């Protein structure tokens, strides 16, 4: 594995169905928002909503 030079982030890996991957990449391209930022915001929002029960 390459040297990690990330100071304020950690790497993680996951899998997606091909159609979700395409949606994510298309949205990132259209909005010019990096995929990592989209995923970060989505996870925070998901966890926040789950905690509101």
Image (cartoon, rainbow, N blue to C red):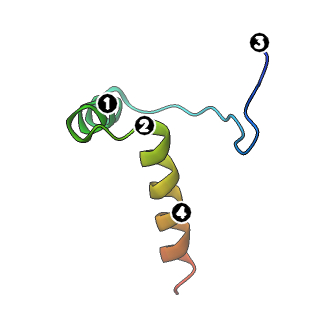
Numbered circles on residues, count: 4
Would you name the residue on which mark 4 appears?
44
Per the model, the C-alpha gap separating discs 3 and 4 is 27 Å
Disc 3 and disc 4 in contact, CB within 8 angstroms: no
From the image, tell me which residue sits under label 3.
1
- Quadrant of the image occupied by residue 18: top left
Q: Is residue 21 above or below residue 1?
A: below
Query: Label 1 near label 3: C-beta < 8 Å?
Result: no
| Earlier-in-chain disc, 2 versus 1 | 1
The quarter holding residue 14 reads top right
Q: Which residue is mark 2?
A: 35
* Element carrying mark 1: helix
Image x and y of residue 40, in percent: 52, 51
Report if the CB atoms under discs 2 and 4 are less than 8 Å apart.
Answer: no
| Few, some or many residues within 10 Å of mark 4 (<14, 14–19, 20+) | few
Q: CA distance from mark 1 to mark 4?
A: 19 Å
- Which residue, given by chain and number where applicable, does mark 1 sit on? 25
Position of residue 52 in the picture relative to residue 20 (left or right) = right
Tell which residue pokes out farthest to the bottom in this image.
53
Mark earlier in primary sequence (2, 3): 3
SS for callout 4: helix
Mark 1, residues whose alpha carbon is within 10 Å: few (<14), some, or many (≥20)?
some
Which badge, 2 or 4, is on the more N-terminal residue? 2
Q: CA distance from mark 2 to mark 1?
A: 7 Å
Q: Does 38 sit left or right of 51 as displayed?
A: left
């Amino acid at each position: 594995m390459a040297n990690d030079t990330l100071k304020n982030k950690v790497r993680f890996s996951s899998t997606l169905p091909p159609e979700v991957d395409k949606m994510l990449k298309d949205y990132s391209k259209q909005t010019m928002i990096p995929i990592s930022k989209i995923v970060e915001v989505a996870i925070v929002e998901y966890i926040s909503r789950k905690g509101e029960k």
